[in-house]
Image (cartoon, rainbow, N blue to C red):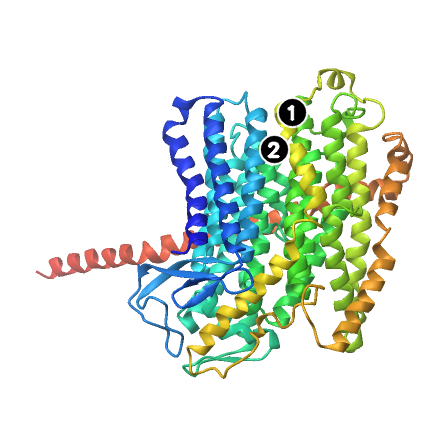
Amino acid sequence: MPTPALLLLIATLLPLGGFGLLLFAGKRFGNPIAGWVATVLIFASLLCTLAATIVWLQAEPGHYQGSEWGDGTGPINIPMKWLPIGLTAAPGGISQDHAGYLDLGIYVDSLTLVMFAMITLVAVLVHIFSIGCMVDDARFERFFAYLSLLCFSMLALVLGGTLLHVFLCFGLLGLCSYLLIAFWDESRDAGAAALKAVLVNGIGNAGFLIGLGVLFYHMGNASLPDLWTYLGSAGYGHSVVLPGGVEFGARLLTFAGIAFFLGAMANSAQFPLQFWLPGTRAAPMPFNALLQAATTVAAGVYFVARIFPLLTPNAKLFIAIVGLITLTMAAVVATVQSNLKRLLAYAAVSQVGYMMLALGIGSWIGGLFHLITYAFFMALLILAAGSVIYAAGDEQDLTRFGGLWRKMPMTAITFGIAVLAIAGMPYLSGRSSMTMILTHAAAFSAAALREGHNRAYALFFVLPVAVSYLTAFYMVRCWMLIFWGKSRDPALHDRAREFSMMWGPLCVLAFLSIVSGRYLNLPPLLESSIKETQAICRDNQMRDDFFELREDFPGFKFVWPTGFSSENNNSLVAVVTTAALVERHWVHWGFLFGIALAVLVYLRGYATTRLLMRAPPVRWVYHWLLHGMYFDELCLAVVARAVRTLASVCDWLDRKVVDGSPNRAGTLARRAGRLAGLKR
């Protein structure tokens, strides 16, 4: 096994070992030793990841089974047989790497390394913060055991080379989410939120299974490189013919892509399955940071990026529309939230909506670039909020804060850096990735209008720009209500204090929120991932006589230029150049509008908003938004009614058909016996 793959495999297994160790011996370690054991193991995962990255970026490419691997050269793909199924391939499909078995596998490329580095780095900081934050909890050891299992699940997902591997890891992530959301199970809110997460996860898994069944039925293969190779032309929007003569229709490909996206929607809390994430406010704050920034919520975006070559234009348009609705709705709802955890959850949903929009319009690098920068500033926002909540005795209501910058200056500064990063402040991380997404959104809208499509395509640029202003507004509002002005609860203000144990993670995340957009070389690494995918698909094509030799793999043909790749299409370059000018005109200083409005409205706390609330229409809209547009209640009512109806049908079938048929047969037999006895 090549060194990078071996190191990443070790990095994945280390937190699994931590879970087992703490599960059986956590009580013996006690508090805080159990926390440090988990932290040391995830830190070792980070060191393994850094070592693998250094080897990967070496000048000379490595070799494995006749193929080259390395930065921009090619990936490492190691299929491994798992369950015997007896079939070598579907009729007319593609043979598996291990005939007669379902395959799992390891797949390593530049994207894998970037994701590993982000996940392990954020996880280390969350673990350190948790040691200080959870120090008084009676279930301290159990918390770190669950946190280790969550890290293992996400790392295993990223390392996976088959859709089956990804599906199993999605299930593990769902289990970890349930365990940690319901961690304080004595709380009714925690139990309800955990059940919501399970329900949504089940819906997503059902969609994923349907998509997996469609692909496996027609192809008999779920390996990502093989799927890319044979279905990579799906982006053209026409049918794909497999070597065995089976035709994979465009509508069926679209259906499979949307079914897979349903799994991503559930994990990443996208419309209309977003209602479970704001309910996690009853969970421990460090878990929320890891959940929303680097693991479960990020998993959906990563998965969509991996299946991007398999998506038809209609499937991508569906993803873009869902992302657009999500980012807009979540941002509007976030503007009035008074619960700190709930506000940050809606902020996370909105930012992930930007990533889904980016992937849907073809900004593959932009979406993943924003995923990495988002992980740092979102983790910082949530951990800084956790520091505030912990200092305030678990208080989450923004109406009771105010003036805390004097008592918590380090938290105020780091929280402010995260707010400016998500708002799009120049020279901070969120600015770089958001600029790329908005530039490509402008290019997408401009190209669609040039081709004569409906004018509604302009919304793919106009709404994200408007929401970027709104994001700056509601995040600055959040900071001012916590730290600015006078205290609205003197007793809370008096007992609030910072804890030095939490400073380190906040400062490191603040530093990363500043430098990750401009100085970590992320877009070129993501560009290398595209080149590596193209390389393995070309190798697969050369081994199969079915293909004519192609210079370029078509799976990423419809990705927007990013400034890091060459593009010879002068018309397309003109569109993107024009889009960049439009984006700069609309957005370059637009974030200041949101900041200025928030300062103006909340400079005196709630005084201005109380005046506005005297108008009945404003009050009605406020309550509508405060309750999430009542969308949660609507979805839960519809889903609950559907589940009850399904349960009633199943109960009737069980009683009348499953149990009823044998019972009736027995009754008839007894009657027949009696009649026979009477005749004798």
User: Does residue 367 sit above or below 48 in this rendering?
Assistant: below
Q: Tell me if residue 641 can be seen.
A: no
Q: Nearer the viewer, residue 601 or 4?
A: 4
| Quadrant of the image containing the C terminus | bottom left
Name the amino acid type tagged 2.
Met
User: Does residue 317 sit above or below 662 in this rendering?
Assistant: below
* Residue matched to label 1: 390
* Residue matched to label 2: 285
Q: Classify 10 Å Cα crowding around label 2: few (below 14), some (14-19), many (20 and above).
A: many
Q: In which quadrant of the rendered view does residue 77 lie?
A: bottom left
Decide if residue 595 is on the left or right side of residue 664.
right
Where residue 527 sits: x, y (%)? Answer: 62, 62
Number of labels in the image equals 2
User: Does residue 443 sit above or below 591 in this rendering?
Assistant: below
Q: Earlier in the sequence, mark 2 or mark 1?
A: 2
Q: Residue at x 58, y 46 (%)?
A: 118
Q: Is there a contact, CB below 8 Å, between mark 2 and mark 1?
A: yes
Instruction: Name, please, the residue furthest toward the left.
Output: 680
